[in-house]
Amino acid sequence: MIKRLAVIAFVCAVAFTACKDEEKIPDVSNIKAPLQLQHFEKDFFSLDTLNLDTSLQLLHEKYPEFMQPYVFEILSGQAQDFELAKRDVKAFIRSYKGIYDSSSVISDNLNKEIAALKKGLQYTKHYFPKYNVPSNVLTFIAPLDAPFMFTDNSISGSMRIGNTFGIGLQLYMGNNFSVYHSTTFQEKYPGFVSRRFSKEYIPVNCVKLLVDDIYPANLKGRTLVEQMVEVGKRMYVLDKLLPEVADTLKIGYTKAQLEGARANESAIWGHFITQNNLYTTDPNIIKDYMNDGPNTTVLGPASPGFIGQFVGWQIVKKWMKENDKSMEEMLRTPAKQLFEESKYKPG
């Protein structure tokens, strides 16, 4: 059965054309969400390394929120040891000058992504009017092995510091960036991860940070189906906050993977029913469905990874379609209750 599902998904993915649910998108044009873009990396790589104390002080005055965490946490990791941090700053400028030079192609052409992010902030204020959204976007360059945010098991090149979105350009250089294809880089970020390292993911990764804040992940100790619904809730919110962004970017699948999952939604659900594992709490079983990867191993090589996210998203969409509830009411509804009330059974 599992092998057959994989073959069907591969074949149908070629010909299947997905249709997004026809839902009215609210008009948010009158909602104010100012967003200022700053290029920290341009000022940083222009530092006078022969007069570093003064140069760093001036940089701190221009970027008071970002400068300290950047130097002492992202870049150096030397706590508050200023002399060691200065050494690391000089070394980083020397070794990452090539990546900085390449980044200008991205940083100078972010109009589309910033516009999409601003629209996402407008939708956020529409659905969550009491929530304070950031008003600044700051681009920078960090070490390729720097620790970054993980959102529902997906690596993000973005972070949030106070009122600012930070965009680590080193993880948005595009699929053709030669560094991404090196053996060392692939060991840390395999192909199924690095193919998402393009600027089109910037609005998604930033808005995911808002979803994290509005509805933090709470999966520990939950059953498989509850975990699927919980991440499905977050996908539903992300979908509403970025209704004009491609679903492939929001879920992180290729076009063929998403079309295959949609075409075979009934067969995928049938697998869960046959395996009788919806209410398991066994982490060894759950990881097969709730971890990112090149595919969902138990469904075959043609399937997308993290299939639990896709299924959970469909469950939440069905529940919302049949219940006259607000987004906040949906988020407050216990996952088990939502699943049972959804009567999800694709076919």
Image (spheres, rainbow, N blue to C red):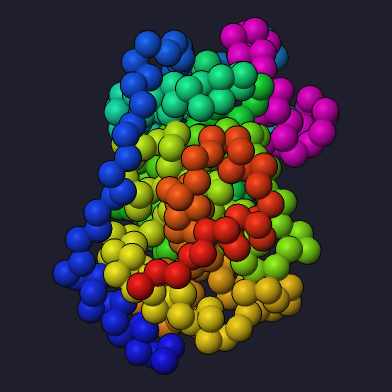
Quadrant holding the N terminus = bottom left
**Residue 90 visible from this viewpoint:** no
Q: Give x and y (percent) for residue 217.
A: 67, 48
For the image, the number of numbered tags is 0
| Residue displayed at 39% across by 79% down | 267
Segment tinted magenta in the rendering: 56-84
| Residue 340 vs residue 70, the one in the foreground | 340
- In this view, which residue lies farthest toward the right? 80
Task: Residue 68: say if magenta.
Answer: yes
Task: Residue 327: say if magenta.
Answer: no
| Residue 196 vs residue 142, the one in the foreground | 196
Quadrant holding the C terminus = bottom left
Q: Is the magenta stretch mostly helix, strand or loop?
A: helix
Q: Give x and y (percent) for residue 66.
A: 64, 21
| Residue 139 vs residue 98, the one in the foreground | 139
**Residue 80 visible from this viewpoint:** yes
Above or below for 35 versus 199: above
Above or below for 163 versus 260: above
Would residue 6 be found to the left or right of residue 276 on screen? Answer: left
The quadrant where residue 339 appears: bottom right
| Residue displayed at 69% across by 52% down | 334
Q: Give x and y (percent) for residue 64.
A: 67, 13
Q: Give x and y (percent) for residue 185.
A: 50, 59
| Residue displayed at 50% across by 46% down | 323
| Residue displayed at 33% across by 65% down | 262
| Residue 308 vs residue 135, the one in the foreground | 308
